[in-house]
Image (cartoon, grey):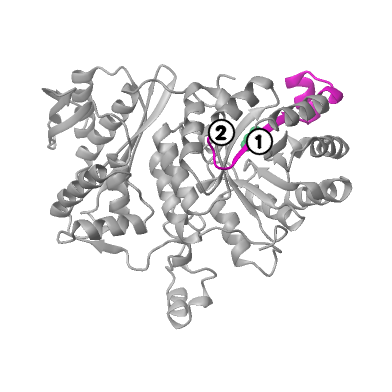
Amino acid sequence: MSSKDQLIIFDTTLRDGEQSPGASMTKDEKIRIARALEKMRVDVIEAGFPIASPGDFESVKAVAETVKDSTVCGLARALEADIDRAGEALKKANSGRIHTFIATSPIHMERKLRMQPDQVVEQAVWAVKHALKYTDNVEFSAEDAGRSEIDFLCRIFEAVIDAGATTINVPDTVGYNIPDQFGNTLRTLIERIPNSDKAVFSVHCHNDLGLAVANSLAAVNAGARQVECTINGLGERAGNASLEEIVMAVRTRQDIFGCDTNLDTSQIVTCSRLVSNITGFPVQPNKAIVGANAFAHESGIHQDGVLKHRETYEIMRAEDVGWSANRMVMGKHSGRNAFRARLEELGIDLGTEEALNEAFKRFKDLADKKHEIFDEDLQALVTDKGAEEISERVKLVSLKARSETGETPVADITITVDGEEKSISSEGSGPVDAAYRAIEALINSGSDLKLYSVNNITSGTDSQGEVTVRLEKAGRLINGQGADTDIVVASAKAYINGINKLMQAVDKAHPQGNV
Ligand code: KIV
Ligand code: ZN
């Protein structure tokens, strides 16, 4: 593919995606997602905003040290301290990019920055030149470009390209644009800026009017060759353009788009599930590409058509985005090698033999309770704990919950805290409430439960329940996950997982919250 034909996929799940309230991720979670994105052959992974907090800095650094095939990018305002911090975090990257930005709309310049347009241009040029001291791969974004004056955009972009920026990003920061208009903006910029051929034009669209994907695609048709997007459309407020929708639209409509991506689309569903599990943001069933119903045909007429000729009602193949045709994979008699091989096929890398052995033991325990083990079960099994390097100071030993019509539910629980066994009985409004009260009585974590959600992983009453909890303590939000065929046990596991994360050194507040 020549560079003119390649659409660069810039994934910002770990940065803008993490700005969704409640979606903040630990360093290990970010590394797992980054590995999955690399495996999917995403071109650029924006791993975070290093100046935002020590935790964000460490995460960008760790992703930069882990990922080899994708470019790893760090965000920085057009300020010296931000750029230096990003440069430091990216030092060990195989291929690193600094993404620096400043706002260019009248409202942002006047009301937020309190700077004159000339000063903004000067600051932007200075920032690009400063970033070039760390890497020759520098991206410049004009924040709120979607509400900026076109003449001013032409002026600032020409200046930063002259200064050495190689990617020019045009964000619709507040999701205000309409496809025709946004496409025209891109076309005009590319035509009018004299040195536009020296840079790749990129777009970054927010979804406030539900138009992020449509606006991004209009821009691609007008000549943009990088799209910034996130898995499942995660992101600030209504989110960003969804990676899977952009990639599959371009791949499916090659007759319309003069470009394609390098992505291995068969990894899309795995990435989607991973991000959903880690953040606790469920994917709606009717979500394009990755929703559970995206390839399900309910109407008899449609089913009949698909059986006669698939393309009567399907424009893409489910397998091409990673929905496996044969979802039942393993059972009680499956061995360790088959288990390892299936995890590899699912893009799950547990890192060490010890982690694999532990996960295999959990798989065997699950297979004793559940006859058929599906891919989704395996994914939950490793999300549950295995792949994550959190120290498990608190462990669930046993849980007995009783509920009966007309009686107060009771939970008897035994846990270990730093190896010391503790037991208690508590009452609650239901068995889950009783279990949580019991855990709190033993640990006294002082956290607030902000979200509790249960999803069944596969269909059927023997399926595993996957529970996500969101806990808050001292302004810090974390998600805990747990899965089990017994949802009270899954709930206790999720709560304990969250508490273990909270007990780890505080590593970050909300990104951008403190800058
Ligand atoms: O939405 C936005 O403008 C951003 C920039 C930092 C690119 O996220
Ligand atoms: Zn954004």
Crowding around mark 2 (Cα neighbors within 10 Å: few <14, some 14 to 19, many 20+) is: many
Crowding around mark 1 (Cα neighbors within 10 Å: few <14, some 14 to 19, many 20+) is: some
* Alpha carbon separation for disc pair 2 and 1: 9 Å
Residues in magenta? Answer: 91-119
**Callout 1: SS:** loop
- Give the amino acid at mark 1: Thr
Name which quarter of the figure residue 322 lies in. bottom left
Name which quarter of the figure residue 436 lies in. top left
- Give the amino acid at mark 2: Leu
Q: Earlier in the sequence, mark 2 or mark 1?
A: 2
Q: Is 486 on the left-hand or right-hand side of 232?
A: left
**Visible in this render: residue 147?**
yes
Q: Please report contact status of discs 2 and 1: CB closer than 8 Å, yes or no.
A: yes
User: Which disc is residue 373 wearing?
Assistant: none
Name which quarter of the figure residue 478 lies in. top left
Identify the image quadrant of the C terminus. top right
- State the residue at coordinates (78%, 24%): 123
What residue is shown with label 1? 135
Give x and y (percent) for residue 16.
57, 36
Q: Is residue 369 magenta?
A: no
Q: 405 or 401, which is in the foreground?
A: 401
**Visible in this render: residue 280?**
no
Identify the image quadrant of the N terminus. bottom right
- State the residue at coordinates (49%, 49%): 38
Q: Is mark 1 within 8 Å of ligand 1?
A: no
Give x and y (percent) for residue 387.
32, 41
User: Which disc is residue 90 wearing?
Assistant: 2
